[in-house]
Amino acid sequence: MAEILEQAAPTAANDGLRKLQGSHIWYELMTIDPEGAKRFYEAVIPGLAIGDRLPGDQDYRIINRSDGGSLGGVFGLKQQQLDRGARPIWMGYIGANDVDGTVAQIEAKGGKALMPAFDIPQGRIAMVGDPQGNPFYIMTPIPPGGQEEKQSDVFSPTQEQRVAWNELATADPIAARQFYGDLFGWTSEEFMPMGEFGEYRFFAHQGTTIGAVSGCVEGAPAGWRYYVRVPSIAKAAETVKGNGGTVAMGPMPVPGGDHIIIGHDPQGAEFALVGKE
């Protein structure tokens, strides 16, 4: 990521570093066709509006919510990035009090720095992989002037147009629980049995359930999956199919009264949605 719009960048209070470490502060769609992604997601997720390309060499756009906030950004992949192995994917940004120190911890625990730490006007970031190879970003954001007390609100378990659930499918969920727990203070004591697929362990951060970790279901890819809340899953599934996407799973009910779908957008990135039936 080369640029993030300053007024929409994830922020954290200078005296709130405890809250920053381990918080989900930004989400980013990496895609081969930003204009195509704009048409698709604006149709599928009511209220979202993907902005125009920002100034600079990198095609970067902000995903705007109808309340004036943001969900994250859209990163247009260049051919040289594709040649180096990049692919369409949704990525999450996890807050870190000290990016360089956190990278060192990740490497000491068997993870890897996929992109060394570097500075942008909105903070310091690095792309990393956990010991099982699942990628994510870490970031120490710089709050815009006059907004030092602002906190990121891109994650919410209940509000629409935000990510409501962060789910990790991994080859070694026990090791993942240890890794993310040590690194970010996430707890994972509560779980739901999944029969032959083991346990679905719920991740909590500072008292809020933020998602879960499980083993890989046969035929499904490993990695992080981010569920955006929409008003109607049935309507969303129809809209996905009518706009060039595919639905690989669902609609299916989940505990708590919600339903989910998992699919692929027209550019090949996996996405997930949650909402009422």
Image (spheres, grey):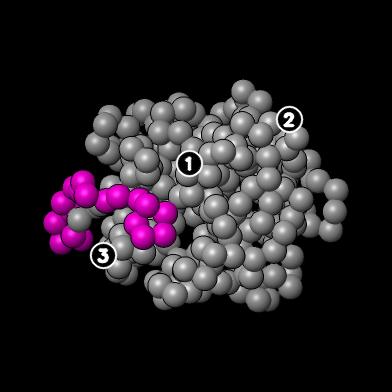
Please give the name of the residue rendered at 14% of the width and 56% of the height, measured from the top-left corner: 195
Labelled disc at residue 179 = none
How far across and down, in percent of the image, does residue 164 sit? 43, 37
Labelled disc at residue 174 = 3
Q: Check contact, mark 2 vs mark 3: CB within 8 A.
A: no
Packing grade of label 3 (10 A; few <14, some 14-19, many >=20) is some
- Find disc 2 in the rendering and name its residue: 146
Q: Between tags 2 and 3, which lies in front?
A: 2
Residue 5 forms part of the magenta stretch: no
Left or right: where 91 falls relative to 227: right
Mark 1 and mark 3: Cα distance apart in space: 25 Å
Q: Which mark sits nearer the N-terminus, 1 or 2? A: 1
Provide the residue span drawn in magenta: 181-198
Specify the farthest residue to the top: 67
Residue 188 forms part of the magenta stretch: yes
Establish if 113 lies above or below 189. below
Packing grade of label 2 (10 A; few <14, some 14-19, many >=20) is few
Amino acid beneath label 1:
Lys
Q: Check contact, mark 1 vs mark 3: CB within 8 A.
A: no
Query: Observer-nearest residue: 31 or 132?
Result: 132
Please give the name of the residue rendered at 76% of the width and 50% of the height, measured from the top-left corner: 121
Query: Observer-nearest residue: 112 or 141?
Result: 141
Position of the N terminus, as image quadrant, is: bottom right
Judged from the image, the secondary structure of the residue bearing numbered disc 1 is helix
Mark 1 and mark 2: Cα distance apart in space: 19 Å
Please give the name of the residue rendered at 61% of the width and 52% of the height, measured from the top-left corner: 140
- Find disc 1 in the rendering and name its residue: 19
Amino acid beneath label 3:
Ile
Establish if 128 lies above or below 200. below
Query: Observer-nearest residue: 135 or 218?
Result: 135
Packing grade of label 1 (10 A; few <14, some 14-19, many >=20) is some
Q: Check contact, mark 1 vs mark 2: CB within 8 A.
A: no
